[in-house]
Image (cartoon, grey):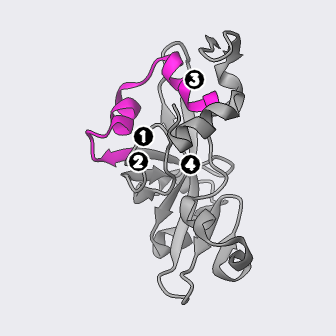
Amino acid sequence: MHVACRICNATHDLEAREPSFLKPDPFLAVPPEERYFRTLDGKDSCAVRDADETNPRYFLRVLMPFSVEGLSEPYSWGIWVEVSEAQHQRVNELWDDPSQDHEPSFPARLANKLHLYPGSESLAGLVSLSGPGHIPHFHLTAPVTHPLAIEQRTGVSAARAFEWVLPVYHPEVFIQWVTGAV
């Protein structure tokens, strides 16, 4: 599906890109020179320790799906969520289990700040495993009145979904959002 761009007046293929994060924000907050000692880093999971090696935190990479008007398949944010140590270990145990999708959903908190959604960091939700080779899904549960939760529940227009990936096509826009120049 092609969407008209308000920046360059061209059309861009919405389905060619989905918004995603490489790491959770707490991981990125660790100074690069300390990451070797304070983090365990993987493609789909990671852990972070405080400088004094207390309060370990555990994270999983998940998809947060949305219905988008005009698309037959969900359009997803690739995000990271924080989970308990026990749940992190359980997911690792089940990672290659063909029946992992029978595991009950478990609580998690959003571990990335989404630039278009103030107050999105730490929103609560549930993670569902969906089988080996599939990224788990995350559905927001609280607060149900947060704009991100409402949009996940009700769906969005293609134009709104394109706003999510606009910085991919036009990085200068993201810099303006971050600095407040927009």
Which residue matches tag 3? 162
Q: Are marks 4 and 3 in contact (CB under 8 Å)?
A: no
Crowding around mark 1 (Cα neighbors within 10 Å: few <14, some 14 to 19, many 20+) is few
Residue visible at 56% across and 35% down?
76
| Inter-mark Cα distance, 3 to 1 | 15 Å
Q: Disc 4 vs disc 3: which is toward the camera?
A: 3
Q: In this view of the protein, which residue sits in the foreground, 14 or 113? A: 113
Magenta-tinted stretch: 140-166
| Inter-mark Cα distance, 1 to 2 | 6 Å
Q: Are marks 2 and 3 in contact (CB under 8 Å)?
A: no
Q: In this view of the protein, which residue sits in the foreground, 45 or 129? A: 45
Residue visible at 47% across and 17% down?
157
Q: Is residue 163 above or below residue 50?
A: above
Residue 166, horizontal then vertical, whole percent: 62, 28
Which residue matches tag 1? 117
Q: Is residue 119 above or below residue 39?
A: above
Give the number of the disc on residue 120: 2
Total labels drawn = 4
Give the residue type at disc 4.
Answer: Ile
Say which quadrant the N terminus sits in.
top right
